[in-house]
Image (cartoon, rainbow, N blue to C red):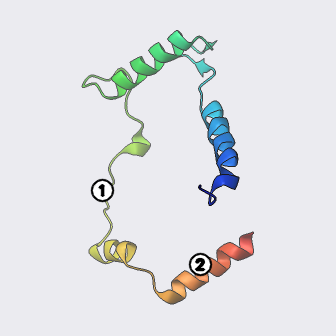
Amino acid sequence: MIKVGDMNTKYFHIRATNMKRNNRIRALQLEDGSWTSDHRKISSSLTKHFLNIFSEERSTPIDPSFTISTNPISDDENEAHGAVPSPEEIEQTLKQSLLRR
């Protein structure tokens, strides 16, 4: 007989069901500016959009904010980003996160 976790099973099932319900696209604005809630039109529009994004010939230019940086970070900066935090840094971060609550 399983006793550990039995109390939370119903809770997690309800949470998962609610998340699934909330993660649906109920309406979408089409390219022409109109809105639709028709599942087939939403599916068709999304398929067309992503095929356009990943095709060789693009009908719309790529947003310039997504261009590759010509100023890459230095080796020192890259190493610092990948470094394991010190115990002091971990403690400071935990204290700050507890203060925000």
Nearest to the observer: residue 52 or residue 67: 52
Quarter of image, res 64: top left
Question: Which mark is drawn over residue 70?
Answer: 1
For this orientation, the residue located farthest to the front is: 1
Q: Is residue 63 above or below residue 12?
A: above
Element under disc 2: helix
> Is residue 65 toward the left or the right of residue 39 in the image?
left
Residue drawn at x 59%, y 20% as measured from the top left: 28
- Gap in Å between the C-alphas at discs 2 and 1? 32 Å
Q: Badge 2, how many Cα within 10 Å: few under 14, some, many 20+? A: few
Determine whether, in the image, residue 60 is placed left or right of residue 30.
Answer: left
Q: Quadrant of residue 33?
A: top right
Q: How many marks?
A: 2
Q: Is residue 44 above or below residue 13?
A: above
Provide residue 60's location: percent of width, then percent of height. 39, 24
Q: Please, is residue 92 above or below residue 73 in the view?
A: below
Point out the image quarter for the C terminus: bottom right
Under circle 1, the secondary element is loop
- Foreground residue, 56 or 42? 42
The residue at 73%/76% (across/down) is 99
Q: Are marks 2 and 1 in contact (CB under 8 Å)?
A: no
Residue at 64% x, 58% y: name it: 3
The residue shown at (36%, 73%) is 82
Q: What quarter of the picture does the N terminus occupy?
A: bottom right
**Horizontal and vertical percent for residue 98?**
70, 75
The label shown at residue 38 is none
Quadrant assignment, res 10: top right
Q: Foreground: 7 or 65?
A: 7
Of labels 2 and 1, earlier in sequence is 1
Identify which amino acid the numbered label 2 is placed on.
Thr
Residue pointed to by mark 2: 93
Badge 1 crowding class, 10 Å Cα cut-off, few under 14, some 14 to 19, many 20 or more, is few
